Image (cartoon, helix red, strand yellow):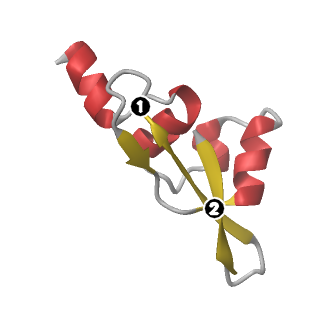
Amino acid sequence: MEIILEEELDKEGKVIAYAEGSCSLTGATYKTAKFKLNDYERWKDGVLIQNSLHYLSADDREFIKTQISPMGWSQMFG
């Protein structure tokens, strides 16, 4: 999975990014919604992902944590 930086900044001048990569179960490409890079870095520094990236869907947060897409979870658990 890669973190892709956008050329745009948000209203506060913060860097915008998104995560994209292959699902570790299906191999299919998945791309998250855009998020603030500093919020991602807060998660990497130990803040709970549901607190630092609260505005992302649970599916997007799960992909960032595990590299498993919604389709991968469906295949695994039906």
Disc assigned to residue 73: none
Q: Secondary structure at mark 2?
A: strand
Residue situated furthest left in the rendering: 78
**Residue 11 at what x, y percent from top left?**
68, 84
Under mark 2, the amino acid is Ala
Q: Quadrant of the N terminus?
A: top right
Q: Secondary structure at mark 1?
A: loop
Asked if the residue under mark 1 is in contact with the one under mark 2, i.e. CB atoms within 8 Å, the reply is no
Residue on which the image places disc 2 = 17
Disc assigned to residue 23: 1
Mark closest to the chain's N terminus, 2 or 1: 2
Residue in view at x 79 percent, y 32 percent:
46
**Residue 28 at what x, y percent from top left?**
33, 37
Give the class, few, some or many, for how many residues have Cα within 10 Å of label 2's Cα (few <14, many ≥20): many
Residue situated furthest top in the rendering: 77
Number of numbered discs visible in the structure rendering = 2
Q: Considering only vertical position in the picture, is 4 above or below 21?
A: below
